[in-house]
Image (cartoon, grey):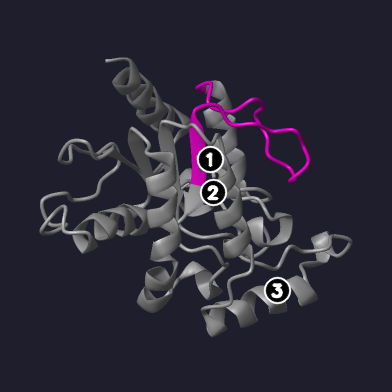
Amino acid sequence: MTGAAELRTLAQEIIECRACPRLVAYREKVAREKRRMFRDWTYWGKPVPGFGDFHAQLLILGLAPAAHGANRTGRVFTGDRSGEFLYRLLHKAGFASQPASLHRDDGLQLNNAYITATIRCAPPENKPLPSEIANCRGYLERELDLLRPKAVLALGKIAWDAYLGVLKRRGVIPSRAPFPFSHGAVAKLPVPLPTLFGSYHPSQQNTQTGRLTEAMFLRVLRRIQRFFTS
C-alpha cells in the first residue's frame, strides 16, 4: 500500500472513531442543533481527518475542529474565521491554490503542506481534556510516519506540546522543557526529525486583538520556505 493510500485509510479510521464519549456527544449535539445562520447545512458531525498534499514537506498542526467550522464542513480549518486567516496566508505564501476554503468540494488544493489537528473532534469550549489528546495521539504519530515531513508548524502551545509529547513518548527527547513555545520559535530537534516551528494560533482572539497579524504569520511561513531551500 502506498503512503497516499495509507493516509486515505487512516482518514477513514479517524472519521469512524468514537473513542471519547464526551466529544462524541458534543459534536453530535452541535450537528443536530446547529447555529441559526447554518440551519440549511447538513453538519459533518464526525471526527475531521487531515487534509492536503500527501507528499508535503510541511505538516501544519492545529488544535481541534471548531464546533460550527470543521465540525460543520468536514474539512480542517474550514468554515470559521481561523480558517479564513490561515488559508488566505497559505495562498499568499504559495502553499494553497486559492485563498479561501469554503467546503470539501470547493477545489482547494494544498501545495507541499498538509494540515491536521491535535484532536479530531470539536471539544466543548474549545478545551480538550488531556485524556482526549492522548486518545488522538496515535493518529498524529501515524501521519508523521507516513508523511515524513521536513518541518512541523505548530499553531499554538497545545499543538506545540502535543508534537513534543510524541517525541518524548518515543524516547527521542527526554523532556519538553528545553523547547519553550513562543511565536516564531524554532526547535532544532535531533536529526532526522522535522524542525519544529511555532506560531500563535490564528484564533479570533489572537487575530482580532493584533496579537497575531498577517505579517507575523507570513514571516513564519517565509522562514519555513527558506529552510526548505537552505
* Residue, disc 3: 30
At horizontal 70% and vertical 68% (from top left) the residue drawn is: 45
Determine the secondary structure under disc 3: helix
Q: Secondary structure at mark 2?
A: helix
Magenta stretch, main secondary structure, is loop
Residue position for label 1 = 2
What residue span does the magenta drawing correspond to?
A: 93-115
Please state which amino acid type lies under the numbered disc 1: Thr
Closest to the observer, 54 or 45: 54
Rendered-image quadrant of the N terminus? top right
| Position above or below: 92 against 147 | above
Amino acid carrying mark 3 in the image: Val
Circles 3 and 2: CB distance less than 8 Å?
Answer: no
Residue 229 percent across, percent down from the top left: 33, 15
- The alpha-carbon separation of the residues under discs 1 and 2 comes to 6 Å
Contact check, label 3 and label 1, Cβ < 8 Å:
no
Disc 1 residue crowd, few under 14, some 14–19, many 20+, Cα 10 Å: few
Question: Depth check: 146 or 196 in front?
Answer: 146
| Residue at the disc numbered 2 | 6
Check whether the beta carbons of the residues at disc 1 and disc 2 lie within 8 A of each other.
yes
